[in-house]
Image: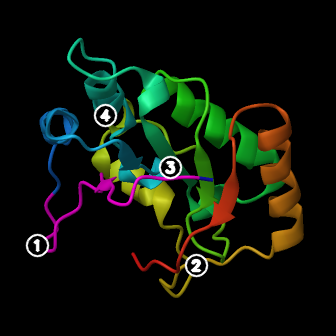
Amino acid sequence: MNLPTIGFGTSPYRPDGSRIDLEEPVRLALDAGYRLFDLAEMYGNERAIGRALRSSAAPHRSEIKLVGKVWRTNFRPEHVRRACEASLQRLGVDTFDLYLLHAPEAWRYLAPLEDPEEIGWPEFERRAAPRDETGAIAIDDVPLAETWAAMHELVSDGLAAHIGIGAESRM
């Protein structure tokens, strides 16, 4: 797989806890020549980024490399495909060039991570960080091999050209 050397990260989260809208920064990045974009279901901004990627000034999709990530609450095989398809739909594209597990450890599933524009940020974040009775992140015991097999199906079905596992991330 051949990726551009420099990519544009699209996490809306800032160190002070605030979030920013990435639609205009992505448009500016495209104008500046960026062609690799790091996206994630957890970032909750796929619709806004999709609008920027489909703008009249954006290059053709074939010139852009999109890296997507399935969030840790969707690692059960029955959720992987739905999460990928929902991300692609929100972005308005047919396939990811690279689709990653956001991190190697699964968290308990609560509900689909739908667009915060539809369900609101508090509900989105509640679904993204399931807690147990002590308040700790609720881990899921889904075997990574099962999740990985579901990821391979995404490649077989043309939803992702390549797959991988992202680095550990803390929330």
Residue that appears at 74% across and 40% down: 81
**Viewer-nearest of discs 2 and 1:** 1
Residue 132: give its label. 2
Residue 24 appears in the figure: yes
Q: Regarding mark 4 in the picture, which secondary structure is present there?
A: helix
- Judging by the rendered image, the residue that carries numbered circle 4 is 49
Q: Alpha carbon of mark 2 to alpha carbon of mark 1: how far? A: 26 Å
Is 80 above or below relative to 58? below
Q: Type of residue at label 3?
A: Val
Q: Type of residue at label 2?
A: Asp
Residue 109 appears in the figure: no
**Viewer-nearest of discs 2 and 4:** 4
- Judging by the rendered image, the residue that carries numbered circle 3 is 67
Q: Say which of 94 and 150 sits in front.
A: 94
Sequence-wise, the earlier of marks 2 and 1 is 1
Q: Alpha carbon of mark 2 to alpha carbon of mark 3: how far? A: 31 Å
Find out whether residue 65 is within the magenta segment: no
Point out the stretch of residues depicted in magenta.
Answer: 2-18
**Viewer-nearest of discs 2 and 3:** 3
Residue that appears at 58% across and 78% down: 132
Q: Regarding mark 3 in the picture, which secondary structure is present there?
A: strand
Label 1 CA crowd tier, 10 Å (few <14, some 14–19, many 20+): few
Sequence-wise, the earlier of marks 3 and 1 is 1
